Image: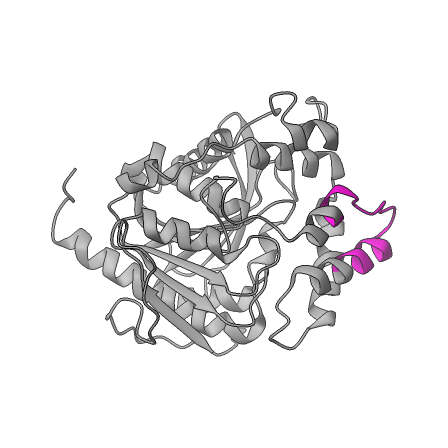
């Protein structure tokens, strides 16, 4: 089931209704595909580090940049989803954040203790703002101007920071299973919080795969079929590309120390879509709803049964909604520069 609401700042609880996200019809094919053209891998210097990235589609098409979440590599953006967006006439870029996968691991920065992270006893090794600077550096390195930005979980924190601090680089904003930075909304369920504070000790590839299955069963989408083979395969490939628990703690410290952006989000004027699982135990739906209320004229899409992951059954729907939003952004871009 998909419930979509129009959430407007300052108007209380949004009403729920089923509808098209933007009113823009998109002609694209979202079936699984193995023949998508122009898929490339690379490294680019950005913000004094190196970022690993991969692209799908025609580089002359409108660019969509995908930002993944905490301790998660770019390959967690499913190939089928990326290829589906490319089939909709978009140039798709996914990349590894600092401290994961093939990007620079900042081993010169001592990882904070979890206790210090929780109580914010010490400043983090780097901030969400620094990671937003990485995104801008990526855009510069790839020669991209304005882009359609999509962020999931911690990637949503980063995407919001880019939209606020570098507004001239963002044409549309899609935020998935994320929050405003306020501690009053989007908080995890206690059992999930406890699990985050007691991460398993992982010493080999097999243990990494088993831990990923355990975590997915805890925070994933219980309303959809659990694809254990996909989770295990993704975890194995992530291990091969670069497992770094110290980097994970540095990213966690950045997330925990982020500011409350609720008031600042009212400055965002680009078309925005907020996607959230209505049964997300890691980032409660109140986080996504708070974003939708804060960003003027944003739209909220809540999915029953979806937790804190990207369930396979919803990949075509995510493609349709993101493509529709980008089409709206491109349409507005052709009408001239936006006010403010």
Residue located 50% across and 43% down the image: 184
Residue 187 rendering spot, x and y as whole percentages: 57, 48
- Magenta stretch in the rendered image: 195-212
Q: What count of labels does the image hold?
A: 0
Looking at this view, name the residue that lies furthest to the left.
Answer: 335
Residue at (27, 66) in percent of width and height: 22
Query: Is residue 88 shown to the viewer in this render?
Result: no
Image coordinates for residue 54, horizontal then vertical, percent: 52, 51
Is residue 13 among the parts visible in the rendering?
Answer: yes
Q: Position of residue 23 (x, y in %)?
A: 23, 71
Residue 315 image position (x, y, % from top left): 50, 70
| Position of the C terminus by quadrant | top left
- The residue lying toward the viewer, choosing from 59 and 237, is 237
**In this image, 133 relative to 270: left or right?**
right
What colour scheme was applied to this rendering of the protein?
one colour
Q: Nearer the viewer, residue 123 or 238?
A: 123
- Image point 68% across, 22% down: which residue? 109
Q: Along the horizontal axis of the image, is 309 left or right of 84?
A: right
In which image quadrant can residue 329 be found?
bottom left
Q: Main secondary structure of the magenta part?
A: helix
Q: Residue at horizontal 61%, vertical 45%?
A: 70
- Whether 109 is drawn above or below 230: the answer is above
Q: Quadrant of residue 231?
A: bottom right
* Depth order, front residue of 4/325: 4
Q: Is residue 257 magenta?
A: no
Q: Is residue 11 left or right of residue 310?
A: left
**Position above or below: 258 against 308:** above
Outermost residue, front side: 12
């Amino acid at each position: 089931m998909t419930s979509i609401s129009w959430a407007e700042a300052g108007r209380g609880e949004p009403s729920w209704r089923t509808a098209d996200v933007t009113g823009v019809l998109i002609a694209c094919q979202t079936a699984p595909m193995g023949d998508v053209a122009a898929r490339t891998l690379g490294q680019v210097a950005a913000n004094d580090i190196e970022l690993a990235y991969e692209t799908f589609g025609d580089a002359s098409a409108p660019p969509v940049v995908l930002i993944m979440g905490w301790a998660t590599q770019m390959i967690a953006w499913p190939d089928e989803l990326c290829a589906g967006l490319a089939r909709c006439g978009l140039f798709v870029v996914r990349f590894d954040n600092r401290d994961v996968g093939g990007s620079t691991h900042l081993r010169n920065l001592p990882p904070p203790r979890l206790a210090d992270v929780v109580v914010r006893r010490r400043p983090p090794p780097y901030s969400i703002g620094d990671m937003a600077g990485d995104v801008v550096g990526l855009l510069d390195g790839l020669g991209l101007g304005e882009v359609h930005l999509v962020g999931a979980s911690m990637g949503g924190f980063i995407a919001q920071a880019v939209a606020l601090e570098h507004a001239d680089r963002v044409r549309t904003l899609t935020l998935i299973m994320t929050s405003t930075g306020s501690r009053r909304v989007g908080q995890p369920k206690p059992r999930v919080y406890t699990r985050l504070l007691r991460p398993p000790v992982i010493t080999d590839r097999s243990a990494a795969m088993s831990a990923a299955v355990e975590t997915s069963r805890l925070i994933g989408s219980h309303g959809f079929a659990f694809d254990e083979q996909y989770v295990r395969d993704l975890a194995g490939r992530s291990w091969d590309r670069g497992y770094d628990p110290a980097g994970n703690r540095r990213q966690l410290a950045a997330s925990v120390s982020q500011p409350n952006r609720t008031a600042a989000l009212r400055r965002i004027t680009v078309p925005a879509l907020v996607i959230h699982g209505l049964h997300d135990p890691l980032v409660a739906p109140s986080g996504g709803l708070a974003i939708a209320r804060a960003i003027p004229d944003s739209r909220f899409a809540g999915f029953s049964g979806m937790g804190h992951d990207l369930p396979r059954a919803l990949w075509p729907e995510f493609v349709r909604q993101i493509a529709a939003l980008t089409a709206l952004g491109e349409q507005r871009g052709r009408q001239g520069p936006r006010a403010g």
